[in-house]
Amino acid sequence: MPPTVHPAPPAPTTARLAARDVTLGYARHPVAEHLDVAVPDGSFTVIIGPNACGKSTLLRALSRLLAPTAGQVVLDGRPIAEYRSKEVARRLGLLPQTSLAPDGITVAELVARGRYPHQKLTRQWTAEDEKAVAEAMAATSVTELSGRLVDELSGGQRQRVWVAMVLAQQTPVLLLDEPTTFLDLAHQIDLLELFTDLHLAGRTLVAVLHDLNHAARYATHLIALREGRVVAEGPPEQVMTADLVREVFDLPCRVVPDPETGTPMVVPLARRRDGA
């Protein structure tokens, strides 16, 4: 079945999540300095760039997992450092690159942990929580796995379970660090179509993707990083050019219209070999 061609929503003009003049790094080794990034509200923003350029580091900072050594991350008009942890978790859902499940936990139990930010001393498990978990598992096609131990699942199955847990949080903003890792091509497309549906329903998504054609097809806003700085940002049809790919990835290519969606499609140039 060909991928769904989704209508483009109106261009967002505000940013509920932004990094302002931040310096990011680990153990005194800066990854990015004086970095300014604004995530358009209501967008499906995809961050692209070569390995070690700062993509995941930026996402960790936006989620408050990594504190900037200078500057600040702002969420809904306030520095994110001022929020309590549960407040952040009710506003932001994060799917990290790697996650470890506790030993002996089932799929249903892990997905249910996505409801933790909504729990209080006076509010325990409710029918609303049950519905959120059921909908998240159905959306990621893991309902039939609900009674299985997470340790017994394949890498692709586990990845979908973690996505389900993040969806169960029901946050207005989702941060996704390489969400298609471990998935075969069919499940990659299924998951990206699901993210597009969530975006069209009003959520703001920020994802790190390595596949440039997936990024160009599904994003409404691209941010291209290289060596910790923003090289270009904007709609895919403006950002994804042969010159940009050559500058950011050192990859000679052609950019042609995707025959299914009309979005930019990157075609690397063939290397010439002796006798070919």
Image (spheres, rainbow, N blue to C red):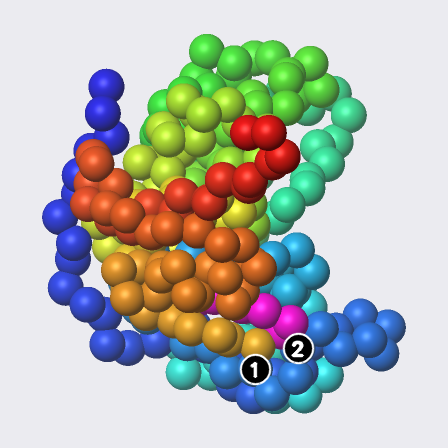
**Residue at the image position 31 percent from the left and 59 percent from the top:** 236
Residue at the outermost front position: 275
Q: Main secondary structure of the magenta part?
A: strand
Say which amino acid is labelled 2.
Ala
Circle 1/circle 2 CB separation < 8 Å:
yes
The residue indicated by pointer 1 is 35
Distance between mark 1 and mark 2 Cα atoms:
6 Å
Q: What stretch is highlighted in magenta?
A: 221-228
| Above or below, 35 relative to 191 | below
Picture quadrant where residue 43 is located: bottom left
Q: Was residue 223 drawn as part of the magenta stretch in this picture?
A: yes
Task: Tell me, yes or no, if residue 41 can be seen here.
Answer: yes
Looking at the rendered structure, the kind of residue marked 1 is Leu
Q: Mark 2 points at which residue?
A: 32
Query: What is the quadrant of the N terminus in the image?
Result: top left
Estimate how packed mark 1 is, as few (under 14), some (14 to 19) or many (20 or more) residues with alpha carbons within 10 Å: some
